[in-house]
């Protein structure tokens, strides 16, 4: 095991062999990792999680996150990786690493997860864009295997039919579980006979989906399928996630039931802020990072804590700036802080005083934070 600094925190990585390598489409591949028996416990995962790979580029070593496409019951870890161009890091991974080669892999992480409820009747709707299908594939395999009463709807967007990843696998799943799984494909750059399936997945498309697909519910004649939705899963690029998350919220789905993952950096929150706070000026801020203590002053609380610390060039860990990755998680040891949005922390963690610096503002003239969480 090696401890590597990643996203501002020491993270355990293990050397694993590549067990399988497969071309999925002209620009996507699948990797299966060989987990030795003595590390099986380190690589237990939940559907929706990811691992990070460290590999060589011309200029040195890099680390990237890749979602797990296998389900926990399959007892393996497979990854889906998109190669955007011959200049991309993913292409170098594809070109330079073969079956049997060793690569450093982090232990599974991420909170794009939902609780399992095998004894309940549930309706889950998912939206994917391109390679964003990868964590949803793990979710769907797991739910179909463990929740016999849950029905699933997948709306999957790509540029064209040639770019659909895992098409055969998805179609086979739909046939095998035809009473519980329905899949609809959308294409943004390829005309379809039914214009409903032409164009990007966004707020306008969701309105059509609700009215034309999720309208009649055979299990309850007095309501629609959309009325019965318990959880929403969204994975893709920022524009798609923000548009669909807000549209789902405005169509009656509670924010805590809308789960999302992004495959590009988000620099703003998903939902517009709905809260107003009194202005506080001259805020003293003390904080601990990697054993070092710092002290600074905020002019006021108009901006979030993370943003103000970054503007002052402090080495604060972060990745997404949108409350999704959890890199900037810290604990409030003194003072009051308001957490505006939260897709990452559990209720218990919030009760313990943990916050996400990227989604929090100061509520008192002095706050003390600790980023060194065990």
Image (cartoon, grey):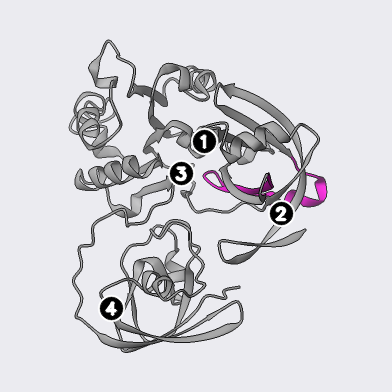
> Residue 128 in the image: x percent, y percent?
40, 34
> How many tags in the picture?
4
Residue with the mark numbered 3 = 263
Q: Nearer the viewer, residue 42 or 238?
A: 238
Circles 4 and 1, Cβ within 8 Å, touching? The answer is: no
* Residue 70 as seen in the image, left or right of residue 214: right
Mark 1 secondary-structure assignment:
helix
Q: CA distance from mark 3 to mark 4?
A: 30 Å
Mark 4 secondary-structure assignment:
loop
Numbered range of the magenta stretch: 34-57
Mark drawn on residue 42: 2
Mark drawn on residue 134: 1
Q: CA distance from mark 1 to mark 2?
A: 21 Å
Around disc 2, counting alpha carbons within 10 Å, would you say few (fewer than 14), some (14 to 19), or many (20 or more)? Answer: some
- Please, is residue 68 above or below residue 59 in the view? above
* Residue 34 as seen in the image, left or right of residue 190: right
Asked whether 51 falls inside the magenta stretch, the response is: yes
Q: Is residue 174 visible?
A: no
Q: CA distance from mark 1 to mark 3?
A: 11 Å
**Counting residues from the N terminus, which is met first, the one under dot 1 or under dot 3?**
1
- Please, is residue 103 above or below residue 312 in the view? above
Q: CA distance from mark 4 to mark 2?
A: 41 Å
Query: In percent of the image, x 46 and y 36: which residue is there?
Result: 132
Comparing labels 1 and 2, the label whose residue is closer to the camera: 1
Mark drawn on residue 301: 4
């Amino acid at each position: 095991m090696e401890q590597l600094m990643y996203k501002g925190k020491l993270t355990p990585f293990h050397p694993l062999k590549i067990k399988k390598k497969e071309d999925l489409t002209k620009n996507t591949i699948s990797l299966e990792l060989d987990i030795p028996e003595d590390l099986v416990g380190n690589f237990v995962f939940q559907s929706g999680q990811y691992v990070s790979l460290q590999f060589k580029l011309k200029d040195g070593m890099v680390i990237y996150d890749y979602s797990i496409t296998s389900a926990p019951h399959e007892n393996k870890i497979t990854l889906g990786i998109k190669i955007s161009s011959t200049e991309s890091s993913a292409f170098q991974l594809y070109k330079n690493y073969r079956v049997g080669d060793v690569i450093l892999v982090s232990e599974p992480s991420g909170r794009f997860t939902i609780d399992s409820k095998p004894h309940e009747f549930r309706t889950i709707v998912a939206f994917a864009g391109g390679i964003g299908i990868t964590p949803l594939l793990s979710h769907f395999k797991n739910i179909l295997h463990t929740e016999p009463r849950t029905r699933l709807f997948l709306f999957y967007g790509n540029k064209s039919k040639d770019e659909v990843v895992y098409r055969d696998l998805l179609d086979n799943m739909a046939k095998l579980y035809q009473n519980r799984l329905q899949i609809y494909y959308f294409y943004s750059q390829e005309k379809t006979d039914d214009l409903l399936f032409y164009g990007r997945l966004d707020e306008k498309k969701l309105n059509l989906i609700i009215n034309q697909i999720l309208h009649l519910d055979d299990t309850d004649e007095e309501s629609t399928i959309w009325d019965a939705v318990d959880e929403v899963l969204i994975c893709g690029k920022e524009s798609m996630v923000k548009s669909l998350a807000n549209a789902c919220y405005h169509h009656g789905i509670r924010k805590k039931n809308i789960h999302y993952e992004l495959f590009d950096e988000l620099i703003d929150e998903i939902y517009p802020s709905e809260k107003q706070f009194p202005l506080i000026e001259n805020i003293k801020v003390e904080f601990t990072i990697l054993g070092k203590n710092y002290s600074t002053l905020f002019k006021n609380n108009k901006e979030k804590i993370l943003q103000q610390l970054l503007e002052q060039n402090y080495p604060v860990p972060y990745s997404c700036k949108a409350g999704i990755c959890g890199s900037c998680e810290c604990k409030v040891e003194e003072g009051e802080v308001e957490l505006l949005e939260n897709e990452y922390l559990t209720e218990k963690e919030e009760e313990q005083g943990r916050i996400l610096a990227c989604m929090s503002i100061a509520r008192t003239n002095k706050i003390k934070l600790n980023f060194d969480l065990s």
